[in-house]
Image: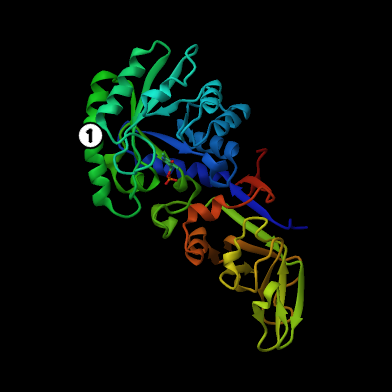
Amino acid sequence: MPLRALARVNLAAIERNVARLRGGLAPGAQMCAVVKADAYGHGAAPCARAALRGGASWLAVATAQEALALREAGIEAPLLVMGALSKEEVGVAVAARADIVAWDPAFLELVPPDRPVRVHVKLDTGMGRLGTRELGQALAVAERVMSRANLELAGAMTHFATSDEDLEFLEAQLAAFAPFVAQVRRQAPRALVHAANSAATLRVPASHFDLVRCGIAIYGCDPMHEDPGQHGLEPALELTSYVAAVKRARPGESAGYGRRFIAERETWIATVPIGYGDGVRRALTNNCDVLIGGRRYPLVGTVSMDNITVEVGSAGAVGVGETVTLIGGDRAERVSAEEVARRLGTINYEVVTALLPRVPRHHHRDGAPCDE
Ligand SMILES: *Cc1c(COP(=O)(O)O)cnc(C)c1O
């Protein structure tokens, strides 16, 4: 029997995506696989291990808890917590032997003084989020890190605001980053310089420096929101459910809450037991296609918490028990995370990360079972 909702994640695709991205890196640059937010919904620990097999030498997460969870899963690779940290969270990150990011001298006072901690200093060159906009402050924090016995200046970093769109602004960010890079290279030649996310990794080799931080692309989604295949990337995630019931709808009969679909002529409706309680967003109401038997059918009516309804047209078009694909391929047809994102007016990142814990993740390697 098919499961009511299932996310199948192909770890072999992640390995190949990492290997492909790595093949395009500037000489000497390492790959850091970003596995924050449960690996963008794909399952953090198995995806982290797949990325390491594919040639990543670093992992990055957003939170201290995410770092701790990877260590508890037995993952020993170098690990960076990229997000802002409270005093308690710094303690968790340091206990997880993760590198942390700093840009404010006051923050360094929160770092436990009694154990070695590796610090990456962040210059805000235009993202306008974390990091300091002042080169002088970034350099002062770097110097303070170097002067403290238990701290090591492990990296100098920035983050791009427009790598998926405006490369002119990215070039300005690179120019603003350059004097910081030059100074850190002089003072701490072993510190890793890093800036690029997935889009910059694919588009701007001059942004690779010593390390690139790739998230979305390793999962086979297109950071430019178009076709991942253009970059040789393979989507790793497939979201499926199954046909639980098929029923006739006579003219005037409706499907779902609020009667947002009313049959104009006789048709047939399949009920599929997956909904917004699984992360299938309610804004897909009357607004997406699913695949059954290699054909596209429209979702009709309101997405409810546990079910959606699909118009299949005629009796016998689909059978109870058939697999329904909401994201992924079925024979020659495919519904991509990029397509769902366009329907929702959002980005592929949010579509895959929105999958909720109720959906089991089954990890496999090109269809073969694996024990992750
Ligand atoms: C999430 C994140 C990344 C990865 O971005 P992608 O576009 O998914 O490759 C890199 N750097 C930082 C600081 C991030 O927060």
| SS of the residue under disc 1 | helix
Residue 121 image point, x, y percent: 35, 28
Q: Quadrant of the N terminus?
A: bottom right
Q: Quadrant of residue 23?
A: top left
Q: Quadrant of the C terminus?
A: top right
Q: Give the residue type at disc 1.
A: Ala
Side of 197 where 110 appears, left or right: right
Residue at (34%, 13%) from the top-left corner? Answer: 147
Residue 261 image point, x, y percent: 65, 79
Side of 205 where 266 appears, left or right: right
User: Observer-nearest residue: 313 or 122?
Assistant: 122
Q: Quadrant of residue 145?
A: top left
User: Observer-nearest residue: 143 or 355?
Assistant: 143
Question: What residue is pinned by disc 1?
Answer: 178
Residue 141 versus residue 37 in the image, above or below: above
Residue 265 versus residue 363 in the image, above or below: below
Q: Give the farthest residue toward the front.
A: 106
Residue at (56%, 71%) from the top-left corner? Answer: 287
Residue 355 image point, x, y percent: 61, 52
Side of 171 where 15 appears, left or right: right
Residue 334 image point, x, y percent: 54, 64
Residue 175 versus residue 309 in the image, above or below: above
Residue 346 visible? The answer is yes
Circle 1 crowding by C-alpha within 10 Å: few under 14, some 14–19, many from 20: few
Residue at (57%, 52%) from the top-left corner? Answer: 354
Ligand 1 picture quarter: top left
User: Observer-nearest residue: 131 or 303?
Assistant: 131
Q: Is mark 1 within 8 Å of ligand 1?
A: no
Q: Quadrant of residue 65?
A: top right
Residue 294 visible? The answer is no
